[in-house]
Image: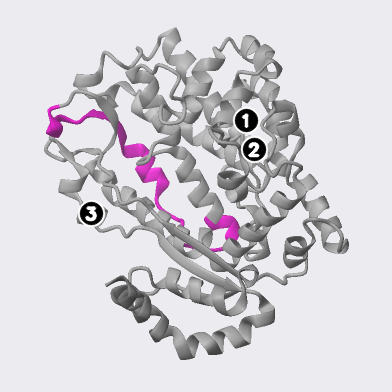
Amino acid sequence: MFGIRRGLGGSHSLRLSIILDSRPFQRLRYIHQLALTYLVYPGATHRRFEHSLGVMELAGRVYDIVTEPDNIHESISTIVPPHDSYDHQYWRRVLRMAALCHDMGHLPFSHAAEKDLLPDGWDHERLTIDIIQSCEMESIWKDLKIQPDDVAKLAVGPKKYKDATFSDWEILLSEIIVGDAFGVDRMDYLLRDSHHAGVAYGKFDYYRLIDTIRILPREYEDSTEPTLGIEEGGLHSAESMLLARYFMYMQLYFHHVRRIYDIHLKDFLKAWLSDGYLPVALDDHLQLTDNEVTAELQKAARDEKHPGHDPARRIVNREHFRLLYHRNPDDLRKNPDAAEAIFDAACNKFGRETVRYDSYEQKRSVLDFPILDNDGRIVSSQAKSVTLKNVPIVAVDYIFISPKYRKNAEDWLKQNREIIITQKEEDEL
């Protein structure tokens, strides 16, 4: 893991402290990386603060590797600033600052409530852009001689900053942080989350992976557009990272108790917040952390008249809904909508307020990146790796029931499961 000493070492320490001491960055000390996961995995109490330091450290390492003159492919040599130039050092500073600031827009308890409790068109990336470009940060960027828009673009990438125009070089640098294949944001959270949760699923050889990352053209697609790829010697490390991501999602991020706590937390926030949404005005956003939400949770759990009392007591007193059903291959073969059928039947039997349904299915997409093979050819990762073609998608279906009805619901489902699943299918024929 990457301690604060290592992240702040050398001549940049004093300059970095300007950002580290800022209100937006200090706020990350009070935002849990994994929301309420610490109620399931007691060690998972780490925060966005240390994750951001780790991402900055890794981003700097990758930049140094891919811009090393001996590692630059001849076809992209004109894109990379000369090693001894001002631009080379400038973009290294921008990249590290973007990595440091990439999570400033996160909401209390990180991703737990983002999807449902922000107004349309808002997400934590948009808040991150606003913070980086805010008056509060303006003097910091001036002292560091950095353009804030350069930082914002690299911090969130072109998919999230659609109003900005990106050069090929800026796209490449944003890939170092948020890229689907080799983004150091992902590298750090897999390693850090695995370490703090006390599980081994997220570990992979990141030293080897980083050492073999290169900027390469997609010659196999007759394209000269540069992107991040790897030397063939790093392929197994890349495969390990992608498999680590799958297992971390299935075993940690989508652990059923963690998921029901997220649901109860969203229910509480909807009841507590005046308009049902988290604030997006910058000052209001920066004043709200996990601490304020936790304090209100404790208060609501004790006060039966509090609008968020029921979900609050379920979190605080561990009276959360219990798992009644989860997706399994046998049921899916009989009926692709098996979970939905059981949810509908459970609602009819026990009441909608006593049942919760949580469903997620990762979009099936092909992750393809260039590989510089041992013969000097640039080939597709999909052509080179059998493993990458067969990484499973993350998919879960959970149905939860109020603990009051747990035993009755389990007996009912055991007796009626087959009928419910097949009847739903027959009704659609």
Residue at 60%, 67% in the rendered image:
257
Decide if residue 82 is on the left or right side of residue 348: left
Dot 2, crowdedness within 10 Å: few (<14), some or many (≥20)? few
Residue type (three-letter) at the residue carrying disc 1: Leu
Dot 3, crowdedness within 10 Å: few (<14), some or many (≥20)? some
Which numbered dot is residue 389? 3
> How many angstroms separate mark 3 from mark 1 (CA)?
39 Å
Q: Is residue 15 above or below residue 55?
A: above
- The percent coordinates of residue 237 (x first, y second) are 33, 50
Q: Is residue 160 above or below residue 169?
A: below
Name the secondary structure under disc 3: helix
Task: Specify whether residue 70 is painted magenta.
Answer: no
Is the Cβ of the residue at disc 2 closer than 8 Å to that at disc 1? yes
Residue type (three-letter) at the residue carrying disc 2: Ile
Task: Specify whether residue 201 is painted magenta.
Answer: yes
Which numbered dot is residue 4? 2
Dot 1, crowdedness within 10 Å: few (<14), some or many (≥20)? some
- The residue carrying mark 1 is 8
- When asked about the image quadrant of residue 165, the answer is top left
> What range of the chain is rendered magenta?
194-222
Name the secondary structure under disc 2: helix
Q: Quadrant of the C terminus?
A: bottom left
Residue at 31%, 70% in the rendered image:
428
